[in-house]
Amino acid sequence: MMSMVKRLGLAVSLGAIMCLSACADKGADASKTAAAVSATRADWGALSDGAKVEAVELKNSKGVSARIITYGATLQNLIVPDKAGLPGDIVIGYDNIEGYEKTPNYTGVTVGRYANRIAKGKFTIDGKEYTLAINNTPNALHGGLKGWDKRNWTITDVKSGDTASVTLQYVSPDGEEGYPGTVTAEVTYSLNENNDLTVSYKATTDKPTVVNMTNHSLFNLGGVPVTRSALDAYVKIESDAILAVDKTLIPTGELKVAGTPFDFNTPGLISERVTSTHPQIVIGNAGIDHNYIIRGGLTAAPKPAVTIEDKTSGRAMTIATTEPGIQMYTGNFLDGTIAGKGGQKLVKYQAVAFEAQRYPDSPNQASFPTTRLDPGQTYTQTTVHHFYTVQ
């Protein structure tokens, strides 16, 4: 794992990540590549009410492609070659729109208005209390009963070229799911020849509110349909502390990771951590469902946050983000009751998520980075997933 440690130790900026990773990609120099990245738009079925769902596929010359569907502004498919050059999908989800509509499970979706949990479904702005739906007893989770993951977004822009992209928009009315303010939200997925898949967000409001957006892709670098646990991978996280949680997974304060199974400053196998009897692992249903405090906090430009390498397939990914936190979730609550792609049951540890975001329950915890958004302000967030191979 020395290559991982060395690469992240040197990568003090997104530019450094891109340079060093490009060197790892068999010396490829994206600036000398003439091939354009394509964006192809197509129909992708219809919802039960007849509303049309569209898809845009972004594809580069290196064999990396991403399919984004309008329902939930969802990353439905992500093809990345392994170390032998064989392509494979690395995100769990569904093969058709019926799966996303009828058995939603936060697979690849854009989460909002508020990603993660808000304690007891209540928060206060300027002395006024707002009440949300309780959909993760006793808390509100991921925007409510019908959050942004269950809305059909509108495509506003599609581009091909050196970088291909698709931009989607959703207007959330005042009072939706209990949240104040009409919020206009935007998410852009872009892919370049350097194998960078970037997800960028913007949001504005006409009334003080809270906004915390993320993408909830669940990855298995070994490939989907799944033949090996997603935990059979090495992870490094640029973090000295997590947010410890109570039994309902609401943060109670910082916990230093040193000497605990949450310490990924030295690359480690995920599978070795979830077998721990540490009380926080037990609370997470024998797994990790915790927010890592990323060194550097909230930044204007993406900073190194996570590296994950699957030695068997050779697929690897770095994540750089502007966000102060990343929620690592090891699929602890996938219980096999729902079938995903290829009819395969979605089971525990099948995939792992790294959700870049502000902290859970921030509206109720004054010491956390604020998630408040006022009229005249613009919420922004950028997260970059870079793909490469290791032998």
Image (tube, rainbow, N blue to C red):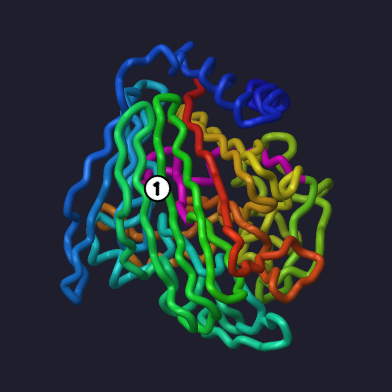
On-image quarter of the N terminus: top right
Q: Is residue 231 magenta?
A: yes
Can the viewer see residue 233? yes
- Where residue 243 appears, as percent x and y from the top left, is 75, 61
The boundaries of the magenta stretch are 216-239
Q: Nearer the viewer, residue 288 or 295?
A: 295
| Residue appearing at x 83%, y 46% in the figure | 258
| Residue appearing at x 41%, y 59% in the figure | 109
Q: Is residue 60 left or right of residue 276?
A: left
Decide: few, some or many residues near mark 1? Use Cα within 10 Å; few <14, some 14-19, many ≥20: many
- Where residue 41 appears, as percent x and y from the top left, is 21, 46
Q: Is residue 195 left or right of residue 120?
A: left
Please give the residue where the numbered disc 1 appears in the rendered image: 91
Q: Nearer the viewer, residue 211 or 47?
A: 211
- Where residue 289 appears, as percent x and y from the top left, is 62, 60
| Residue appearing at x 55%, y 46% in the figure | 382
Q: Is residue 227 above or below residue 139?
A: above
